[in-house]
Every structure is written in structure tokens, then in C-alpha cells.
Amino acid sequence: MAEKKEVPDGWPLVTGDYEVGDPQSCVAISSNGSYFHIEHLKGIAIQGPDKTENIGLEKIMTNIISNPNIRFIIAAGAEVPGHISGGSLMALVANGVDPSTHKIIGTTGAIPFIENLPSEAVERFRQQVEVIDMMGAEDYGQINAKVKELIARDPGAYPEDPMIVKMGGEEAAAAVLEMPLAMPASPQMSTIDRATAQITYKTTIMARDQKLTSGLSKNALFGLMAGLISAFIFLLPLILGVIL
């Protein structure tokens, strides 16, 4: 039987949208953009969605490295457009995080920055778990079959003790994430500012042209009417002379 370790009191340590099963299990599931129900999933430690490739991944890592019994994480469900949370999870485990920019290497996610966890926590996560790519899968039968397969090859708890870390700046970062599919502030914001300025300029020009065109049309009409009245007044004596 695979060797297990005691998990810290109150595990999982970070709050989130998840369901807890057996903390002694070696399998966790990230359903990304989909929602699963744990009563249909047999023998897992924890499962839940992950909508973001930064705070969401940081919460996953924090809860998993504090439970050495978890050795596999299944990335399943629908991918999250823009954030690419499932792809970012797999890229993080495969490639790590750039130490200078804190950006997950090799992901196309919109804001893939791990800024609230130390590099030691990221490396511990990468060493502790194997990510199983089941992206797109939502069938419970298929997922349970994979869970059963992984439990059969459980290598036992990670040899080191639970790693307890505290996420820094979580509230501030979460506030930024209220903007869905938000892009990094720089350099994309400068591009957005330029585009906004161009739209405003073009809108002003169009409004001015429309006003100018409307003014010219009115002036032309008034000019035509004035010309006709002047011609009529000039010709009126001649017309009266002919009549009389």
C-alpha cells in the first residue's frame, strides 16, 4: 500500500470554488471552465473549476503542495477562452515560470503571471505532481476510468512535509481579475489608448463632416431661394408692363 502523510488541519488552506473528497487520495481534478460534481467522481482528493491562469493557479498550487498525498492533477473540462487556464497549468508544470517576469513560460493565456507565491512553492508543485491532459473531457465515466488508473499507480506521498505558504496580495490581484479576459496593463494599455484616441478623432471628423455637409446643403437651398426671389422681383416690372 502506498505510503501516506497527515495533512494540515483545516486543509484545503485556501478558500475557493472546490469540493473536497478524500485527502489521502493521490488525484486532484481541475475542471477549468466546466463544473463537475464530486458525488459523480470516485476516490479523488479535491476538484473544482479554474477560470484564471494566475490567482486560480496559485490557489491550486497552494492547496496541493500543502497535501503531499496528491501526486496527479487531471486537467479536464472546457478551456477558458482568453485565460487558457488549463493550457497554462500544463505549461507551468512543463516549463516553469520566468524568474524575472513571473510569467508562465510557453502559455498563450492573457495574464499568466504567478506573482503571489515564492519560486520554491512553484518548483515544489512541479516536482510533486504530474498533470494529466484530459482537456475537453466532461464525461464522468471517462474521467473516473482515468482516476482509477492513476490510483493504481499511486507512488505514495511526496517525500517532503506539507509546504505551507501564504498568498501575498491576493485581494488586490483579485480586484484586477474582475475584468473578464483582461490583458496585462502594459504594453497593451498603450495600444488601447492609441486605438481609443484614433476612434475619438475619427468620430469627431465624421461628425464635423456631417455638420458641414448639412450646413452646405442648407446654405445652397437658401441661396437658390434667394436667387429665385431676386429674379422674380427684377422681372416683375417687365411682366406687369407686358400684361398692362
Image: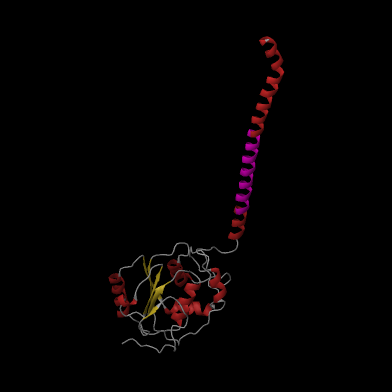
Q: Quick one: quadrant of the N terminus? A: bottom left
**Residue 168 in the image, given as x and y percentages of width and height:** 56, 78
Q: Nearer the viewer, residue 222 or 36?
A: 222
Question: In the rendered structure, which segment of residues is drawn in magenta?
Answer: 196-217
Residue at 45% from the left image edge and 80% from the top image edge:
63
Q: Residue at x 45, y 72 (%)?
A: 93
Query: Does 34 sit left or right of 232 as displayed?
Result: left
Viewer-nearest residue: 50 or 109: 50
The mark tally for this picture is 0
Report x, y in % for residue 170.
54, 76
Please provide percent x and percent y for residue 220.
Answer: 65, 30
**In this view of the protein, which residue sits in the foreground, 16 or 92?**
16
Q: Where 113 falls versus 151 (above or below)? A: above
Location of residue 219 with respect to 181 vertically, above or below? above
Residue 217 on image: x %, y %: 63, 33
Above or below, comparing residue 141 to residue 190 in the picture? below
- In this view, the residue farthest toward the front is 244
Residue 85 as seen in the image, left or right of residue 24: right
Q: Is residue 96 magenta?
A: no
Q: Left or right: 94 with respect to 117?
A: left
Q: On the rendered image, what quadrant is the C terminus found in?
A: top right
Q: How is the image coloured?
A: secondary structure
> Within the image, what quadrant is residue 172 found in?
bottom right
User: Which secondary structure is most common in the magenta stretch?
Assistant: helix
Q: Is residue 205 found inside the magenta-colored segment of the image? A: yes
Relative to 160, is 93 above or below?
A: above
